[in-house]
Image (spheres, rainbow, N blue to C red):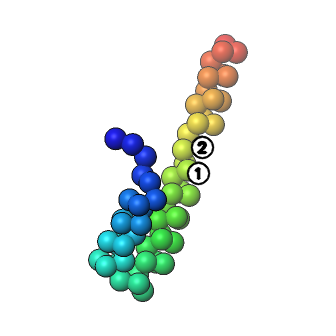
């Protein structure tokens, strides 16, 4: 299994266009981007909390 190349990406976008139609794609892209941003934000918060706990434990 490798990375997704340009050909595969075009194929996936073409299939999405056929399934959802051109009017729904911007809405789907916006909600997907929002979800990824929220996930990244929460992942960074968890990392910061873990680093804080590790620092607090090493001081004790």
**Residue 22 in picture, x, y percent from top left:** 41, 84
From this viewpoint, which residue is outermost toward the right? 59
Q: Residue at x 51, y 52 (%)?
A: 39
Q: Which residue position holds label 1?
A: 41
Q: As drawn, is 41 to the left or to the right of 6?
A: right
Q: CA distance from mark 2 to mark 1?
A: 5 Å
Depicted 53 relative to depicted 35: above or below: above
Depicted 21 relative to depicted 14: above or below: below
- Work out which quarter of the rendered image holds the C terminus and state it: top right
Q: Nearer the viewer, residue 7 or 38?
A: 7
From this viewpoint, which residue is outermost toward the bottom? 23
Q: Residue at x 36, y 66 (%)?
A: 11
- Work out which quarter of the rendered image holds the N terminus and state it: top left
Q: Secondary structure at mark 2?
A: helix
Q: Nearer the viewer, residue 16 or 40?
A: 16
Q: Nearer the viewer, residue 60 or 48?
A: 48
Quick one: label 1, few (<14), some, or many (20+) residues within 10 Å?
A: few
Residue 44: numbered disc:
2
Quick one: label 2, few (<14), some, or many (20+) residues within 10 Å?
A: few
Q: Quadrant of residue 46?
A: top right
**Residue 13 in picture, x, y percent from top left:** 40, 69
Q: Residue at x 46, y 59 (%)?
A: 6
Depicted 7 relative to depicted 21: above or below: above
Q: Quadrant of residue 58?
A: top right
Residue 27: numbered disc:
none
Marks 2/1 in contact by CB < 8 Å: the verdict is yes
């Amino acid at each position: 299994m490798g990375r997704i190349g340009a050909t595969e990406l075009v194929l996936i976008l073409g299939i999405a266009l056929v399934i959802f139609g051109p009017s729904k794609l911007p809405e789907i892209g916006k909600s997907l981007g929002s979800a990824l941003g929220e996930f990244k934000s929460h992942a960074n918060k968890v990392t910061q909390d873990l680093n804080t706990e590790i620092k607090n434990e090493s001081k004790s």
